[in-house]
Image: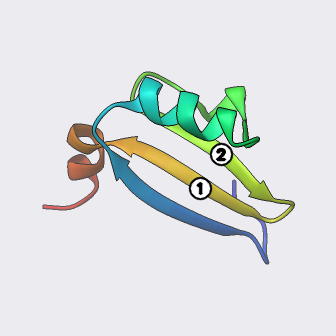
Amino acid sequence: MPRENEIYVNLPVKNLDRSMAFLTGLGFAFEPKFTSDSAACMTFDQNIFVMLLVESFRKTFTR
């Protein structure tokens, strides 16, 4: 559950594994607790997180 003063940015990606590999190579870390086959939570800063969402999964968020 998000706490106050936390920012979550949702970004659609075509290939989650490839996106994660690229960002890991740049030094970013992922939170396994919030990572699945459809989404990954990247820690950008102490209170800033980027959710990488497979496009088909992201489309389920809206009509």
- Residue 20: assigned label: none
In primary-sequence order, the first of circles 1 and 2 is: 2
**Residue type pointed to by label 2:** Met
- Residue 42: assigned label: 2
Q: Residue furthest right?
A: 46
The residue shown at (46%, 36%) is 19
Image coordinates of residue 2 in percent, x first then y, are 70, 60
**Residue type pointed to by label 1:** Val
Neighbours of disc 2 within 10 Å: few (<14), some (14-19), many (20+): many
Asked if the residue under mark 2 is in contact with the one under mark 1, i.e. CB atoms within 8 Å, the reply is yes
- Residue 50: assigned label: 1
State the image quarter where residue 17 is shown.
top left
Query: Who is closer to the viewer here, 61 or 43?
Result: 43
Image coordinates of residue 21 in percent, x first then y, are 56, 28
Residue 3 vertical position relative to residue 56 in the rendered view, above or below: below
Q: Quadrant of the C terminus?
A: bottom left
Element carrying mark 2: strand
- Decide if residue 42 is on the left or right side of residue 21: right
Residue 51 vertical position relative to residue 8 in the rendered view, above or below: above
Image coordinates of residue 6 in percent, x first then y, are 74, 70
Q: How many marks?
A: 2
The residue shown at (61%, 43%) is 41
